[in-house]
Amino acid sequence: MKTILKYIICILVILNLFIVKGLACTALIGYDNPSNGFFQFEATSSYGAAPFTYHWDFGDGTQDSGVSVEKQYESSGSFEVFFTLTDNDGCVSNASFVVQSHVTQDDCDVLDCVYPGDTNGDNQANIYDLFPISIYHGVNGPSRGETSMDWEGQICENWKIDDIYGINLKHSDCNGDGVIDQNDIEAINLNYQNDHSFEGSYGDENDPPLYLELVTDSIIVDLLNPVNVEVSFNVYLGNETNQITDLYGIASSLEFDEELIVPGSVEFYYEQNSFLCNSENLLEVKKEFNGHYDFALARNNGLSSSGFGKIAVVNFTIIADLVVQRTGSDTQMPFYVNVTGTSGIRDNGSTISINNKDLNFMIHLDRTSPNRNLIDDSTISIAPNPSNGMLHIESTEHPIDLVKIMSAQGALIQQYDAGRSMNYNADLSHLPNGVYFINIQSDDRFITKKIVLFK
Ligand SMILES: [Ca+2]
Ligand SMILES: [Ca+2]
């Protein structure tokens, strides 16, 4: 008899099964460990007076209840699991057993790991990741414990809810504190990536438009004194005949001619009286990135809004010298701001088609001043670029009169008299690292080039 009992216990241990026995109530419990760190615990049968309650303490500070529960441990180690069965007559029985959890980074190949900032599970953190944060704003779930916002796979217990696309809401808790709110937006900004290969919900002429209108009257560059030009345009969504119904959030990307605008000069201001919402209820992501200005605006109170009108004003600065160089002998030059990747959402996360409309305008060159000619690019060398502080300028055709160093915003920082030399060394080692423009003048000729200082 003793031999048979030992044999049964041996079989139970091999199968990870345990008998839990109180005075009048008994349960057979077991667990399975299909992947590292992940366990399924189950009470396979119970004896006593139904209904039963089942309580599990996983030994890492977390608990759950139910006849069958899942647990994802966040670290490796031994954990003592406490199980309690209570029947309808108040009979209580307990059992404890130790499980071994093995968690490695490789587990993210098989587990649904959180990458902070990627709330919609497409492996990039960008404007569209604001939407789940706005829709599920205020929802709670298990926290990740000790965590970071670094772009690395982080193991987290599943939350009880998925979004309408089947992505678990734990991905929207970017900072891992157990609540989805505006503090999770920081991870999107920290880990921002956008390949701008937009797909999907492009609208057509029948859909409400997203369009841009210039605020600046006319854009004129003076050929003799090419000063950088500030341009403003308004961003509109919908119009009187084609309004937007049930809008909860909008994301879009404005594509500029990257060479022609001052880096970092794009400014985007939300229109506080916009039909979308007042600014207290607004969540925003804004990023100048690879020649694009990406923005997402969304509400945070679960209610959509309908209407049309101005939603933002955008300012940016055009580099006048480069316009002059690129235009050659023409009197005007076209400039484009392309609207791409626009996506509108309703409060349930479904999409609204929007018709992208680009902005085209002309930059006019004022040639009423005496003409100035460009120095042929092939006759000037500026090296090294990037520079660690010393720049060697060499001209093969025209003697150099003047060397001007300008900030990325076009402000004059320093001016050197080169004494009509064919070679000149400019020392920029006292300036901070960054992008600068160098303007070289010879008689009535000039050339402007972008340089990078990196010490
Ligand atoms: Ca994403
Ligand atoms: Ca959070």
Image (tube, rainbow, N blue to C red):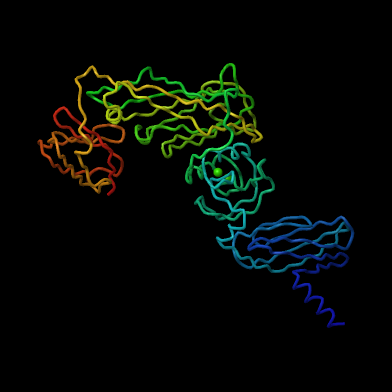
The residue lying toward the viewer, choosing from 359 and 407, is 359
* Image spot of residue 43 (x, y percent): 80, 61
Residue 119's place in the image compared with 336, above or below, is below
From the viewer's perspective, tell me whether residue 335 is left or right of residue 307: left
The residue lying toward the viewer, choosing from 79 and 371, is 371
The residue lying toward the viewer, choosing from 150 and 108, is 108
The residue lying toward the viewer, choosing from 134 and 108, is 108
Q: Quadrant of residue 266?
A: top left
Name which residue lies at 57% across and 63% down.
104
Residue 4's place in the image compared with 174, above or below, is below
Name which residue lies at 41% across and 36% down.
291
Q: Quadrant of residue 397?
A: top left
Q: Quadrant of residue 267?
A: top left
* Image spot of residue 268 (x, y percent): 45, 30
From the viewer's perspective, tell me whether residue 390 is left or right of residue 175: left
Residue 350's place in the image compared with 192, above or below, is above
* Image spot of residue 308 (x, y percent): 57, 21
Quarter of the displayed picture in which ligand 2 can be seen: top right
Count the marks: how many? 0
Residue 161's place in the image compared with 3, above or below, is above
Viewport quadrant of the N terminus: bottom right
Name which residue lies at 10% across and 39% down.
421
